[in-house]
Image (spheres, coloured by chain):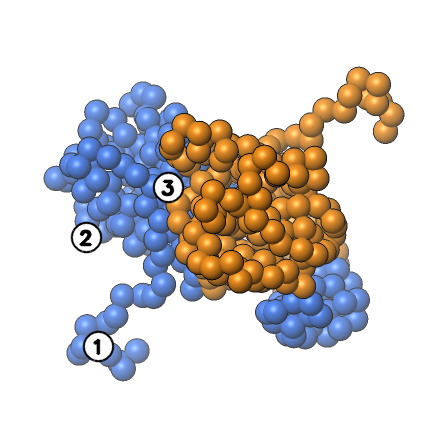
Chain colours: A blue, B orange
Amino acid sequence: MNFCSQCGSARIETRIPEGDSLPRFVCAECATIHYQNPKVVVGCLPEWDGQVLLCRRAIEPRLGLWTLPAGFLENGETVTAGAARETLEEAGARVEVGDLYTLISLPQIHQVYMMFRARLLDTGFAAGPESLEVALFDEADIPWETLAFRTITRTLRNYFLDRKHGALPLRISSLERRPPLPPDLRGAG
Amino acid sequence: MNFCSQCGSARIETRIPEGDSLPRFVCAECATIHYQNPKVVVGCLPEWDGQVLLCRRAIEPRLGLWTLPAGFLENGETVTAGAARETLEEAGARVEVGDLYTLISLPQIHQVYMMFRARLLDTGFAAGPESLEVALFDEADIPWETLAFRTITRTLRNYFLDRKHGALPLRISSLERRPPLPPDLRGAG
């Protein structure tokens, strides 16, 4: 933040406002406090006859890698409506959104993932503009090595394990750090 | 938004960026797209020997009314850490955060509430600067008429009903509108 979006001043300070406990961007001219908060990513784990629907990304980041349909929750929509919208936009897939399955905090990048189980209503899906292809996968065929995000890998790993045990409770977790580099690369970057 | 926080220009347009589907604030000078997204409110339903802990608000909005401890999730924290922090700040109460109990979307005010069940670790709680008083309540004594927010009323109503049935599953819902005015006040402004 270089300028105050309220008054246009460049006198933006980083300080703890009175009565607050964390540093914020505060305009020294008009005193507006510019809060910044985590964003919610909503998505679906669409199920069809034991298979799950994945999309291959046509956009950065992680272009060319596979993911579950998901994206930022928009102002004015509910979490389940957002999950269904992202699934329609990215995978051309109509779903009935079900239970929340994973809730994953990513504090370092200021995101909270909410992945819902969803029942695919038909197989008339098709890649949207943000996807290269969309396909149903059996567990044995999941492209584990080319998944786009750790949240997606975790959601799918939990899912196939839990499914074997016959119960899919909400899984709350966090991904707090990047995985460590292998020893021979440490200090190289 | 009156000015671009990136370049300071006052030429802020509201338009749908290429490849997007919703109108955004876009700077006509430097082309920065200023996304706005819902905020997450995290809080606890602290339990102690069949009672629940409520706080009476010392700040606006809803000054003087009762609530469960809750507030905006901050950058850099997980949802459960945020719920515990708000409980400590507002009620001086130490808790072990448990299951997510209500997930309530408020699309009209761009918020998502996440209320967690929590085990109060001791009764050494005390009102923080944002609370006038903090107290444990039996179901029969809940101040239903002076609760601060509909999300809190819903969470507590669900909780006491579910508890009677012996199961507290995650309740996902939304509050999409203000409750209608009584007929004699409609159109009164």
Q: Which residue is mark 3?
A: A115
- In the rendered image, residue A51, in percent from the top left (x then y), is placed at 21, 31
> Secondary structure beneath disc 1?
helix
Residue type at mark 1: give it. Leu
Residues at marks 3 and 2, CA–CA distance in whole angstroms: 20 Å
Looking at the rendered structure, which numbered label has been put on residue A185?
1
Within-10-Å neighbours for mark 2: few <14, some 14–19, many 20+: few
* Residue lying furthest top: B183
- In the rendered image, residue A10, in percent from the top left (x then y), is placed at 72, 72
* Residue lying furthest right: B188
Looking at the rendered structure, which numbered label has been put on residue A145?
2
Considering the image in quadrants, where does the N terminus of chain B appear? bottom right
Q: Which comes before the other along the chain, label 3 or label 2?
A: 3
Residues at marks 1 and 3, CA–CA distance in whole angstroms: 33 Å
Residue found 68% across the figure and 43% down from its top: B148
Which residue is at the front of the view, A168 or A146? Answer: A168
Residue type at mark 3: give it. Met
Question: Decide: marks 1, 3 in contact (CB < 8 A)?
Answer: no
Residues at marks 1 and 2, CA–CA distance in whole angstroms: 20 Å
Looking at the rendered structure, which numbered label has been put on residue B101?
none
Of circles 1 and 3, the one toward us is 3
Which residue is at the front of the view, B60 or A111? Answer: B60
Residue type at mark 2: give it. Glu
Residue found 47% across the figure and 49% down from its top: B48
Within-10-Å neighbours for mark 1: few <14, some 14–19, many 20+: few
* On screen, residue A50 above or below B57: above
> Secondary structure beneath disc 3?
strand
Q: Which comes before the other along the chain, label 1 or label 2?
A: 2
